[in-house]
């Protein structure tokens, strides 16, 4: 049995598409919980009219806090986390349930809703710079693909065992929105939880539908939360060994923000992230190994200029130091 958790902030039109696709599931959800982050366009009223259980936050409390309120209200063994701007194939839940096995969480193939022949994302990868990449973004949709183990399931569309969320206390609410799913995934790596990618479970994603990808608030929060990932997960030795990749990756991301006219938002986020910057991570061989494997996959697959320049700049980094024992 699975409960769908949908954090919501406006875009009633997209919510209606998601709810239609939930109604078409071959394996039905036991409950649909919509957590309303102060929508003003009638989206919450639509959810009630469609029979959803609506939790009112009273403010735009961010993705992490809204999802936490939702899954804590669920009573089922499984919890599905769904952005309000996704649409699910009718067999999405059926195929995830069939493919998850003993894994703690699962995600499927997420296609671009505006270009259904292209991948929006699958699972998440993270560089040593603490910059994330959604594996396969922009690639053509594969004709054939097999299930594989993953570390990070995107909060866009995934399912979790509720007991895992209980043990990890869900999302870290200090992230607010953006990269909170990456943080949860890195905590799963540390705790030994593994996920699975089930490519025949398909969803379509509109992407940044509430604010837009390069909205100043999105850029500021992403910029801040990249540093928060380092604070939460890097110990001193890992930070030292990754110092040049961190500098190169963060500055390159700033240049991308500048290109989109969002340099001030990027700077504001970095200033917020540097306030009280104190490394909290403890040594973790699993985390180090994941970062190295993650970078290898990004290098082999990513084609956009950001990643090409990143790997050129860090090519001389002493990678063996990353695997040094503690």
Image (tube, rainbow, N blue to C red):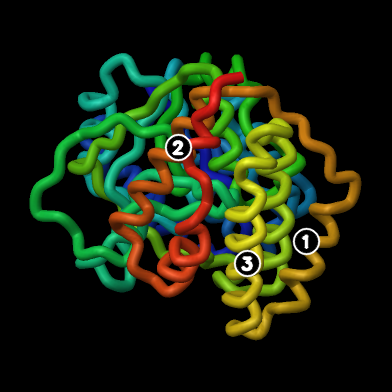
User: How much space separates mark 1 and mark 2, taking CA atoms?
Assistant: 24 Å
Give the quarter of the image for residue 173: top right
The residue at the point 22 percent across, 42 percent down is: 199
Q: Residue lying at the far left in this picture: please name it.
A: 143
Which x, y percent locates residue 232? 71, 35
Is residue 138 visible in the rendered image? The answer is yes
The residue labelled by disc 2 is 152
Residue 20 in view (yes/no):
no
Q: Which residue is mark 1?
A: 270
Q: Nearer the viewer, residue 88 or 320?
A: 320
State the SS at label 3.
loop
In screen coordinates, is 113 left or right of 181? Answer: left
Which residue in the protein does label 3 denote? Answer: 41
Q: Are marks 3 and 1 in contact (CB under 8 Å)?
A: no
Measuring from the top left, give residue 152's x and y in whole percent: 45, 37
Q: Calculate the distance from the C-alpha at mark 3 to the C-alpha at mark 2.
A: 33 Å
Q: CA distance from mark 3 to mark 1?
A: 33 Å
Task: Tell me where residue 295 appears, x and y as whole percent.
Answer: 42, 48
Helix or strand or loop: what does disc 2 sit on? loop
Q: Is residue 324 left or right of residue 233?
A: left
Is residue 141 toward the left or the right of residue 235 in the image? left
**Marked residue nearer the N-terminal end (3 or 1):** 3
Q: Residues within 10 Å of mark 2 (few under 14, many from 20)?
A: many
Q: Quadrant of residue 299?
A: bottom left
Is 99 in front, or is 145?
145
Disc 1 vs disc 2: which is toward the camera?
1
Image height of 17 relative to 114, above or below: above
- Which numbered dot is residue 84? none
Q: Nearer the viewer, residue 36 or 320?
A: 320
Frontmost residue, 274 versus 174: 274
Question: For the point 72% across and 45% down, which residue is it?
Answer: 228
The image position of residue 304, as x and y in percent, is 39, 71
């Amino acid at each position: 049995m699975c409960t769908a958790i949908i954090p919501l902030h406006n875009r009633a039109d997209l919510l209606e598409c998601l709810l239609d696709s939930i109604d078409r599931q071959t394996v039905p959800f036991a409950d649909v919980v919509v957590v309303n982050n102060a929508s003003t366009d009638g989206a919450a009223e639509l959810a009630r009219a469609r029979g959803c259980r609506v939790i009112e936050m009273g403010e735009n409390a961010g993705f992490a806090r809204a999802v936490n309120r939702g899954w804590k209200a669920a009573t089922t063994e499984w919890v599905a986390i769904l952005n309000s701007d996704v649409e699910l194939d009718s067999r999405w839940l059926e195929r995830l349930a069939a493919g998850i096995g003993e894994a703690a969480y699962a995600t499927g193939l997420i296609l671009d809703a505006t270009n259904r022949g292209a991948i929006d994302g699958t699972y998440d990868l993270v560089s040593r710079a603490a910059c994330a990449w959604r594996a396969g973004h922009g690639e053509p949709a594969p004709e054939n693909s097999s299930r594989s183990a993953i570390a990070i399931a995107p909060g866009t569309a995934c399912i979790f065992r509720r007991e895992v969320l209980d043990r990890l206390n869900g999302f870290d609410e200090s992230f607010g929105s953006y990269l909170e799913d990456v943080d949860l995934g890195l905590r799963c790596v540390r705790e030994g939880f593994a996920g699975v990618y089930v490519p025949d479970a398909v969803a379509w994603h509109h992407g940044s539908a509430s604010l837009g990808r390069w909205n100043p608030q999105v850029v500021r929060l992403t910029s801040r939360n990249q540093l928060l990932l380092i604070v939460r997960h890097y110990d001193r030795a890992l930070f030292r060994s990754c110092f040049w990749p961190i500098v190169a990756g963060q500055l390159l991301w700033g240049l991308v923000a500048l290109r989109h006219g969002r340099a001030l938002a990027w700077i504001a986020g970095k200033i917020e992230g540097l306030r009280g910057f104190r490394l909290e991570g403890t040594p973790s061989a699993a985390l180090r190994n994941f970062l190295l494997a993650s970078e290898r996959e990004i290098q082999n697959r990513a084609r956009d200029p950001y990643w090409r320049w990143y790997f050129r700049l860090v090519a001389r980094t002493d990678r063996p130091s990353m695997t040094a024992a503690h």
